[in-house]
Every structure is written in structure tokens, then in C-alpha cells.
Image (spheres, rainbow, N blue to C red):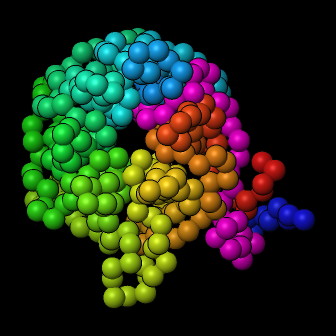
Amino acid sequence: MFTNFSCSNKANLSWAQDGNWVQAAAIFSYPRGHSSSFVIGKTAYVGLGFNETIGGMGRLSDFWAFSLDSGWTQKADFPGRPRSNAVGFSLDSFGYVGTGTDGFNVFHDFYQFDPVANKWLVKDSFPDDRYDAVGFGLQGKGYIGTGFNKYWLNDFYQYDPNTDSWARTPGTAGNFSKRRGALSFVYNNRAYIFTGSTSGGMARDGWAFDPSRQVPWIPLNNITNTDPGSFDDGYTDIEREYASAFVNGDHAYLTLGRNGTMITSTWVYDFVQDIWARRTTYPRQPRYGSVAFTIDGKSFVGTGYTGNATFDDFNQFIPDQAYNPND
């Protein structure tokens, strides 16, 4: 019989019960994988993606907003070609979406979403075509980098919303792995990049990016067991592509994805110590290409793809609760 531990004795739990997964409201539209998302204030926006039942290329162009007060509400459709594997990020009070693929064409167009007017505006196109890239807003600028188009990429470009223009950032280090299907998150005025696949397997290197530094790229510990120390001895299944990540409080969390097979293990990242630790495994159907976000201190993971089927469900991860399989 399961005991629902309180936060006061949560420190005594094993990692298998450290953090609770709770079913949340499904997106009020098609199941989908490889969608795009961004957060503005206390509202998350999710749209685009792939659905195997849609005719043609199977790509979507609808967009939806989710808030704790209102649930899911439909917003203006994305004005570009339907697509999946595109980048989404927020900057100030606007959302941005660009790049991606429809399964045949690869895109570089770029759009801004105004949540007050519920309108999309065409912006300066990204410098080249790609998909499976990462993007983030940081210190007043937008960034898109890595990804795939005929080959794996590791370049990064900076978007200036004041001039509506792109410029290549100071170069990545020579040993920054080219990658696709990586993840990024922002914490304390730095962006972090982990995971993804390379031409030879899975990316193991992690990086922090701080554009205020003369050398903006900061190497981090690898996400597999390569250090002589013991801290990474248990790093057996962090490497993956198409994972989902979110920041909650002073930690980041990584879950789902694939590395040959689909992975459901969940890991928490300590920004200060630059180390990872296991948390409660994602308990629902394995998948990859899901979206994840945190709004008003609450974190959600949802949608996704198995290679054969897509999902519309969402689940909330609660770091300070013990796992209850009935939730």
C-alpha cells in the first residue's frame, strides 16, 4: 500500500518517489508531437507540430494558450506554412516562432506573436533553413542555434527586436558538438544547452551561454560518466534527443526523449554544483518530442510522439511532493 509522504519527510524518499506526476488538462485540439511553445507572463502557448492522422504532410498551424485560471483557449493560427520541429521562445511580452519543417520543405521564416492583439507579425527571416534547433530569449535578445539541414549544425545567431535583424553570435568553441533535437533553458541570465544527437551518436557535452561575458560559452560537466570523480558514475541514461526540460525554482528538470529507444527517466540539474540527480520517472506512455513549461511556479509536460502515434495529454510535475501513482 502506497503512503503519501508529506514534504516534511520527503528527504527520506528514494529518487523513485522524489517528485510527483499529476494528470492535467489535455490540449483542446489535435494530439501532436514536435510542437513549439513559449511562455509570456502566466500563460503558456503551444502550437504547430505533427499529427499522423492529418492529410498531406501531417503538419498543424493552430496555436493554443494555457493558464491556470482559464485552461486551454484557442489563439490566432500561425500564419506561415504548417510545420513541426520549429523553435519557439519569448522575449519581453512577445512570443517568437521560426524555422521548422513540413516533412519535405525546411523553413527559415520568423514571426512575432502579440498576445494582447492576438496577432502574428512577419519578422526578419532567420539567416538559413533548419529544423530541430533550440531557441531562447536572454538579456533582451533572442537566440536560435544548432539543428539540422542536410547536416548537423552548431552555429548560433542573435536576434535584436529593436532593429528586427539577425547577427551571428561570438563563435561556439571548437569542441561544441554539432547537434539536433537538443534542449535549452534559461536561469539567472544564462542559457543552458544539453542533450541532442550528433552524426556519431548522442551529444554528451553541456554548455552555459552568457552574452555579457567576453567569452560567452562556458563548458559544463558532461552528461555521461567521463569524469575521474564519482559524481557522474550514475549518469547512465541522461544522453538523449528530443527531450523535454523546464525550470522550477532553483533547479532544472529533464525528462522523456529517445536514445535508440524511448526514455522516461527524469533528472534534476543543480545550477550551482553543475551536477544531475535522478527524480521520479515519468509514469505515463513513453514518448519524445513533447513540450514543457512552467507557469506561476507550476511545471507541465505534454503532447509527444512515439514514432507511430501522437498524444494530447499533459502532466504536472510537482518537485516537493512524493510520487502517488493514483494522481
The picture places residue 16, in percent across and down from the top left corner, at 67, 67
Q: Which of 54 and 271 is in front in this view?
A: 54
Q: Nearer the viewer, residue 27 or 67?
A: 27
Residue 228 seen in the current view:
yes
Q: 120 above or below 132?
A: above
Q: How many marks can you see?
A: 0
Where does the N terminus fall, quadrant-wise?
A: bottom right
Residue drawn at x 45%, y 27% is 50
- Residue 18, by quadrant, is bottom right
What is the x, y in percent for residue 316? Answer: 64, 45
Q: Is residue 40 visible?
A: no
The question of residue 11 being in magenta is answered with yes
Q: Does the magenta stretch include residue 85?
A: no
Q: Considering only vertical position in the picture, is 134 above or below 215?
A: above
Task: Write down the quadrant of residue 266 in the picture.
Answer: bottom right
Above or below, 246 against 81 in this view is: below
Residue 73 in the image: x percent, y percent?
58, 18
Q: Is residue 287 left or right of residue 155?
A: right
Across and down, in percent, residue 119 comes to 37, 11
Residue displayed at 16% across by 22% down: 124
Identify the residue shown where x is 59% and y is 49%.
286
- Image-quadrant location for residue 230: bottom left
User: Would residue 145 appear left or right of 55 to someone viewing this image?
Assistant: left
Of residue 188 and residue 15, the one placed in the foreground of this image is 15
Q: Which residue is drawn at 25% across and 24% down?
A: 105
Q: Give the range drawn in magenta.
A: 9-38
Q: Which of 117 and 192 is in front in this view?
A: 192
Give the farthest residue toward the right.
1
